[in-house]
Every structure is written in C-alpha cells, then in structure tokens.
Amino acid sequence: MPDILHRVGALAPLDDVYRAIATPDGIAGWWTTDTTGKSEVGGQLAFRFGDVGGFDMEILELDPVGRVRWRVTDGPAEWIGTEIDWSLSRRDDYTIVLFKHEGWREPVEFMHHCSTKWATFLMSLKDFAETGRGRPAPDDVRISDWH
Amino acid sequence: MPDILHRVGALAPLDDVYRAIATPDGIAGWWTTDTTGKSEVGGQLAFRFGDVGGFDMEILELDPVGRVRWRVTDGPAEWIGTEIDWSLSRRDDYTIVLFKHEGWREPVEFMHHCSTKWATFLMSLKDFAETGRGRPAPDDVRISDWH
C-alpha cells in the first residue's frame, strides 16, 4: 500500500517540536486553528477546516522522546482507517521530523493532493517551531483548485 | 514499491506548464538554473546542484497534450533507475499537474526528504508558470540539514 512520506528539519528544540505535534494548542499553530481534543493516548482530536470539513483522530501513541501516532476515525472516506506517524530525532542543531501517512488503499488523485498539502503544512510546522509563527488553516498555502 | 506522489494546480495555460517541464530552459526556471540537454525523446538532461551533485535523466516521453516522462540514468544510488512521470490536464482555470516519482526500492529516509523537496519544487513550478518567477536551486527553499 502506498504511503505519504516527508522529512523536514527544524532549528528548534525537540521538546518544542514535540509539543507542536502532541497538543491541540501546538497543532493549532501550524495545521488548523480549529483544533480541539485531549492530549492523551486514547484521546480524540478534532481538526476542522471551515466549510471544507475536517478529520477526527484517535491518539495511538504519545512519547515525549519523539513519537506521536494518530488513527483517523472520521473524515473523507479515503482517510478513514489510515494512520499518521511522527518520529522526531536530533541531528546537529536540527530536530528532524520523519512523517508517514500510511494505510491508503489506492494512490488516487486525492492522495497526490494530500501529499503536497502535507508538505506545505510540515513547512508550516517548521516555521512555527522556529519562529512561533506557522501558516495554519484558514491561512494556509493554496496549492490548487482543491485548496 | 513506494512512490512519491504530488498534485498542484497552476493558474496558467497548459502549454506554458508543459514548456516549463519539457525544455531545459523551462526547468531552469523552477528546479535548478544549471539544467542542460536536448528536449527530445531519447535525449539526455543534466541537472546540477553545485557541490551537492545532480542527476542525469533520459527523456522517455514528450507529449504536448500533457505528458512527460524521465528515467534517471545517473545520480544518487537510490535514484538510478527510478522514473519521473508528469501528467497535465485542464480543470476550470487551472492546469493540474500530477507528479509521480516511482521505482524507489525502499522507503529510506532520503526518500522522505526527496518527497518534501519535490513538493517545494512543484510549488516553485506553480509560481514560475503563474508569475514567471520560481525558486530554482541555488535559490531553492531550504527544508532541513540536508538542504
């Protein structure tokens, strides 16, 4: 099954990047300002993007050493059941983020879109970790007719 | 085998986007300024990125209706033998670019990096097609310690 893979490096402490991924307040700084939920294993996160809809996810793993894992429980049909895996490590002055969105059933056109869109959100995460300012929705980077 | 997939839409005519992908002069506007070669099926393209090295590719397909395909003949070991597929179509005011870099043997960390890096170059292609100004190397967007 095809996966979406990405890697960015942020000039920021691992703890800061971890908090940006592990907590609703952190995620609101780079993915969507409308992020709610509880930061605990088994907890639910709700990500909303105005009229476009959004995603619900269950937190499967939360390890401050550098690991976060979510399972999509509601949202577009192609996303339901897929899992998103975050792995953080230090390398020189960088916190390296390895990202995987796995479990897609088919490499549909929407998956192509989501891959590019994730890249722009990971750059937003990098900016947020480095400067305190990301580009979360509704102020996110437009990449096409599909937003 | 895992693939890198992306999709962007440019508010530009399909012919302009096609030329930006099908010709060395076009590619120099968004990927690397040091692009040379001959735009014909069976022709070789050389993409260089200063000290970092670069890639040689053979053009497998060139169809102005909206298709370009390359095979990597030299460069980093992970890239050799992989193929890069461009498919263009019109949708409302957009030229949609479907991108596939396929034939990776393993989902190594370098593949994660290349996936994100391709996304930034596709955004550079979009900007180049829309405004005449992209961000080709050596002026490309830095995403990590690996550039």
Image (cartoon, coloured by chain):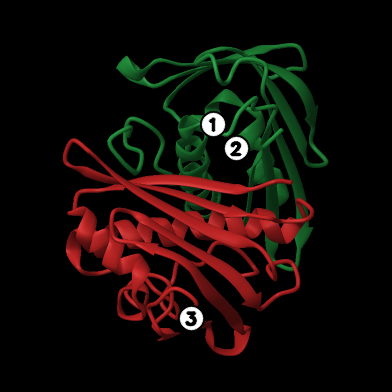
Chain colours: A red, B green
Question: Which residue shows up at 58% across the image and 68% down it?
Answer: A71
Distance of label 3 from label 2 (alpha carbons): 41 Å
Residue B1: x %, y % from top left: 72, 33
Distance of label 2 from label 1 (alpha carbons): 5 Å
| Residue type at tag 1 | Ile
Q: Which residue is mark 3?
A: A45
Q: Residue furthest front?
A: A42
Q: B81 and A71: which one is in front?
A: A71
Does any portion of residue B34 appear in the rendered image?
yes
Q: 10 Å neighbourhood of mark 3: few (<14), some, or many (≥20)?
A: many
Label 1 resides on the chain identified as B
**For residue B27, which numbered disc appears in the image?**
1
Label 3 resides on the chain identified as A
Residue A21: x %, y % from top left: 36, 66
Residue B52 versus residue A3 in the image, above or below: above
Label 2 resides on the chain identified as B
Q: Which residue is mark 2?
A: B20
Question: Which residue shows up at 55% across the image and 20% down it?
Answer: B78
Q: Which one is closest to the eye, mark 3 or mark 2?
A: 3
Q: Of callouts 2 and 1, which one flags the residue occurring earlier in the amino acid sequence? A: 2
The reply to whether callout 2 and callout 1 are in contact (CB within 8 Å) is yes
